[in-house]
Image (tube, rainbow, N blue to C red):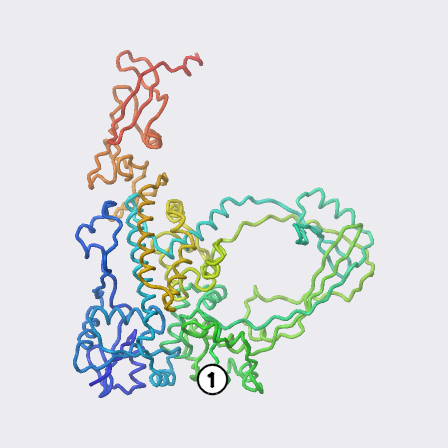
């Protein structure tokens, strides 16, 4: 009898096999006398498609919505079914007495294993391997401390609810709004509110009005000062340097030039900045985007390789920036490994030679750990020279951040001088570094490098002559477009877009998506044509902006995700029943479908390009019969849903007897209100010019109301 170990990927299975000494090869597995080690290839099992429940769902029709199966079914994925069959055979084999789940230690990893377990109908007992590093030592220790698989039941229930809820909302919302607007629309619980954040920023930029303002800088010989005045807003005081009146700015400059100025205050303050927190995935992705221009997906791929293949960093898909107290003995060992490299020798030596590591709650805090601790280097000797350029850049950030947390504070002095001249006040600020501390390890681009601003030694009461005053014109700037770094921050801190205080707190913990999924969400928005990359910026497309216009508030608000994440977290902690959560999701799905039917928004999406590659025809309006797109052919204007049975047609010769031409502009106008008033025609009996009202019915037939003389024309005569 053997134990079956199921890993998430072949590479991970091979690493485990080395530790367990499974050197024999089978088709889709490795083995010895005690263990068989096999693997998934990511997800091997997925949720069934709607048409697999009922043939009627093959056709997208509003009458068949909402689609809410009594029990959501799962199936093997076609592309990887051979590997699923290997696992299923072993799961059912009498040779296997028990299982070890060795998929990634997180919500999705749990789901991958449990779906295989469920679909195969297996009921054998299983244990859970839960590790944060792929080093041989970590794997060995993990197998010595296997957990009972049942301890992770709640994590599985949470993952299952997330998967099924996303399916129910995505399938129903996408179908409902696709049918309504006759264009393929992809809608999702996380991707749609993320798109809404990008679209809102674009709206702010589009509505922004640039205005000019002026600043006055006075030259006191030994130093310069910027004009300011104190503004009060309630109890808050601010120093305003902007002058909105050009004449006033010039008057101030003229007034002080050549006059005596007096120092009225000098403030010196020592400031101390602690080392930054260790990296979680989102913070690492942000820094890699800012410093190297890497996308979130690129960073995730690289750091995943550093974890799985290189064994040089710990588990990357983490949302924690802290370590657990049982790791304290390993910290100097890791620093010692870094000390063996030329790159980090100097900095790591400092850490290793400390009599005692400065362990604070900013480094070690069990209460702030989630499934995994922060990303740090592992205890292996880092083979720096074997890394590609991009691998080194990512590893370098992680290694330096690890060493930085043990370094002293960055200490600097700030000086603020206020100088008065002719009752006008000018401020001068300077900075001097006292102790570089952790900033010694920073690798800064030229843009980031700041020179010290050392000010002269002046005291209150000192007098200077104002040698000159310069007026500068400046312009207000609109908000910046989102890039991946700022969008990741917005997704992580989605609570600031929410008014409900309890949900604000929940979104502080979870945000939109998870560190492991945010990169995929951004890529998905690009793939479906809702946003585009332009340089580092992420810009919403016309289709993306229009989608946000038509969906109800609940679908685009982070509040919805806040409520869901609150529920999913409660399920994972065993504090909420799954039926209660899924019940709320089903009610929500019903609401979304009803909202799509009632929606009266007159947004028109550009026609999708035909598959054969010809450019898409111009959409002239929405069909009053079925909400399809009205398009033109040689004889008339027809509905794009004609294959589905819509008979709507406006024939181009409909008003031929009235001497009127039906063109694109006519069709666009009549589709707006189903009528055109005071339309110029000729009386078919007399040939006399007159006006009439033209009405449109649901089939496209035009009805000409009572003819009358054109009063406007008579007046001009």
Q: Position of residue 179 (x, y in %)?
A: 28, 45
Residue 484 visible in the shown view: no
Residue displayed at 43% across by 11% down: 717
Whether residue 652 is visible, yes or no, is: yes
Front residue of 325/629: it is 325
Residue 246 vertical position relative to residue 287 in the rendered view, above or below: above
Residue at (76% x, 63% y) in the render: 266
Query: Which residue shows up at 71% across the image and 55% down it?
Result: 226
Judge left or right: residue 589 versus residue 248: left
Q: Position of residue 465 (x, y in %)?
A: 81, 56
Screen quadrant of the N terminus: bottom left
Q: Quadrant of residue 715?
A: top left
Q: Looking at the rendering, which quadrant does residue 360 occupy?
A: bottom right
Q: Residues within 10 Å of mark 1 (few under 14, many from 20)?
A: few
Residue 41 at x, y = what percent? 27, 71
Answer left or right for 65 relative to 475.
left
Residue appearing at x 68%, y 43% in the figure: 246
Q: Name the element at disc 1.
A: helix
Residue 37 percent location from the top left of the image: 25, 80
Q: Quadrant of residue 347?
A: bottom right
Residue 90 lies, with reference to residue 51, above or below; the image says below
Question: Where is mark 1, residue-wise?
Answer: 330
Left or right: residue 281 compared with residue 245: left
Q: How many marks?
A: 1
């Amino acid at each position: 009898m053997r134990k079956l170990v199921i890993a998430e990927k072949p590479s991970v299975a091979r690493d485990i096999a080395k530790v367990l000494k499974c050197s024999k090869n089978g088709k889709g597995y490795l083995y010895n006398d005690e263990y068989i080690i096999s693997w998934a290839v990511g997800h091997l099992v997925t949720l069934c498609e709607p048409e697999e429940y009922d043939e009627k769902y093959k056709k997208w029709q509003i009458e068949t919505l909402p689609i809410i199966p009594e029990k959501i079914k799962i199936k093997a994925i076609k592309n990887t079914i051979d590997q699923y069959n290997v696992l299923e055979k072993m799961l059912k084999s009498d040779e296997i007495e028990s299982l070890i789940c060795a998929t990634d230690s997180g919500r999705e990893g749990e789901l991958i294993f449990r779906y295989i377990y469920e679909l195969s109908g297996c009921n054998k007992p299983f244990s859970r391997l839960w590790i944060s590093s792929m080093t041989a030592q970590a794997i060995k220790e993990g197998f010595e401390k296997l957990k009972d698989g049942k301890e992770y039941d709640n994590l599985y229930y949470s993952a299952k609810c997330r998967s099924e809820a996303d399916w129910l909302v995505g399938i129903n919302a996408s179908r409902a709004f696709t049918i309504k607007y006759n264009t393929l629309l992809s809608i999702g619980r996380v991707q749609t509110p993320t798109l809404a954040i990008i679209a809102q920023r674009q709206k702010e930029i589009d509505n922004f009005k640039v205005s000019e303002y002026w600043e006055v800088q006075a030259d006191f010989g030994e130093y310069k000062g910027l004009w300011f005045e104190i503004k009060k807003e309630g109890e808050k005081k601010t120093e305003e340097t902007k002058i909105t009146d050009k004449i006033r700015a010039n008057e101030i400059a003229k007034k002080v030039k050549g006059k005596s100025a007096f120092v009225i205050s000098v403030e010196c303050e020592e400031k101390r900045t602690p080392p930054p927190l260790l990296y979680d995935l989102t913070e690492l992705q942000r820094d890699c985007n800012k410093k190297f221009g890497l996308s979130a997906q690129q960073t995730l791929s690289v750091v995943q390789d550093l974890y799985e293949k290189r064994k040089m960093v710990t588990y990357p898909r983490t949302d924690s920036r802290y370590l657990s107290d049982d790791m304290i003995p390993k910290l100097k060992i890791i620093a010692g490994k870094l000390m063996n490299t030329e790159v980090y020798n100097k900095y790591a030596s400092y850490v290793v030679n400390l009599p005692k590591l400065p362990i604070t709650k900013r480094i070690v805090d069990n209460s702030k750990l989630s499934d995994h601790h922060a990303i740090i280097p592992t205890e292996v000797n880092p083979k720096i020279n074997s890394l590609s350029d991009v691998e080194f850049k990512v590893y370098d950030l992680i290694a330096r951040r690890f060493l930085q947390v043990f370094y002293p504070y960055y200490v600097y002095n700030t000086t603020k001088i206020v100088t008065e001249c002719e009752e006008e006040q000018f401020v001068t600020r300077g900075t001097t570094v006292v102790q570089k501390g952790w900033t010694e390890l920073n690798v800064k681009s030229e843009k980031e490098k700041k020179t010290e601003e050392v000010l002269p030694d002046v005291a209150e009461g000192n007098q200077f002559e104002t040698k000159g005053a310069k007026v500068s014109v400046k312009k207000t700037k609109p908000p910046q477009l989102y890039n991946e770094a700022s969008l990741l921050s917005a997704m992580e801190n989605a609570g600031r877009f929410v008014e409900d205080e309890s949900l604000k707190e929940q979104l502080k913990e979870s945000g939109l998506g998870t560190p492991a999924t945010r990169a995929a969400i951004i890529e998905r928005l690009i793939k479906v044509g809702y946003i585009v990359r332009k340089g580092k910026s992420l810009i919403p497309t016309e289709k993306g902006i229009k989608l946000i216009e038509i969906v109800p508030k609940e679908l685009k608000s982070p509040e919805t995700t806040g409520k869901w994440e609150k529920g999913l977290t409660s399920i994972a902690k065993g504090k909420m029943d799954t039926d209660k959560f899924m019940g709320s999701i089903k009610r929500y799905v019903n609401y979304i479908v009803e909202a799509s039917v009632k929606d009266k928004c007159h947004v028109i999406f550009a026609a999708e390009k035909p598959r054969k590659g010809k450019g898409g025809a111009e959409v002239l309006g929405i069909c009053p019969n079925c909400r399809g797109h009205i398009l033109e052919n040689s004889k008339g204007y027809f509905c794009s849903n004609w294959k589905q049975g819509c008979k709507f047609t406006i024939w181009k010769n409909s008003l031929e007897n009235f001497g009127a031409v039906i063109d694109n502009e006519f069709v666009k106008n009549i589709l707006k209100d189903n009528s055109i008033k005071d339309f110029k025609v000729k009386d078919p009996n007399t040939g006399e010019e007159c006006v009439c009202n033209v009405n449109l019915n649901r089939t496209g037939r035009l009805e000409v109301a009572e003819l009358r003389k054109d009063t406007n024309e008579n007046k001009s005569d």
